[in-house]
Image: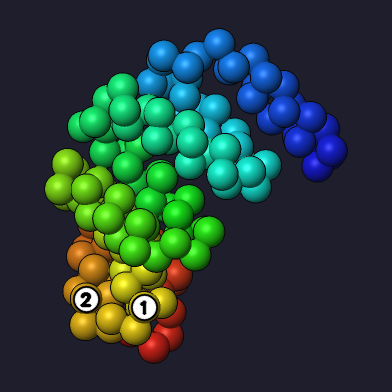
Amino acid sequence: MIQCRRYSLVRIVQKLRLGDHNVHALCNRAMAHQKLNQHHQAIQDFSRAIELAPTNSHAFANRGAEYLRCNHYEQAIQDTSRAIELDPTNGNAWFNRAVAYSTLNQHEQAARDFEQAIALDPSLTEHVPEREQ
């Protein structure tokens, strides 16, 4: 089952190679790269999407999440901050920025962002690190 799913994701990535000027296709391909743990490629596709659509909050939020996965916390904070600026209702952007702040031992900022994330999406409560609750 996992091998079949991986094969399907690889085929999606291959089919989306033609979408280098289509923001929606780039974001979809980036998300396929995420699922394949190909973080560098995902960051590249989200970056290209941002070049084409610099007000796309989801591209910023998702690239910020990828930076977080790669332990690039300052870049994660920059991108999630931009996503929040563009769409203050994006609970995941608030949450990911909180995680980045927490990892950098900036606990006051992290606590504020976790609070805002939970206010926007109560289901995120179960993912808040214990030290931040």
Image point 47% across, 24% down: which residue? 26
Count residues near mark 2 (Cα–Cα under 10 Å), then give few for <14, some for 14-19, many for 20+: some
Q: Is residue 67 visible?
A: yes
From this viewpoint, is residue 124 visible? no
What x and y, as percent, mark residue 83?
25, 46
The residue pinned by badge 2 equals 109
The residue type indicated by label 2 comes to: Gln
User: Residue at point 31% right, 69% down?
Assistant: 98
Q: Which mark is residue 104?
A: 1
Query: For residue 26, which numbered disc appears in the image?
Result: none
Hey, which quadrant is residue 40 in on the image?
top right
Residue at left 63%, top 43%? 38
Given residues 122 and 21, the one toward you in this image is 21
- Looking at the image, the residue that sits furthest to the top is 18
Q: How is the image coloured?
A: rainbow
Q: Position of residue 86 (x, y in %)?
A: 17, 41
Which comes before the other along the chain, label 1 or label 2?
1
Q: Helix, strand, or loop for circle 1?
A: loop
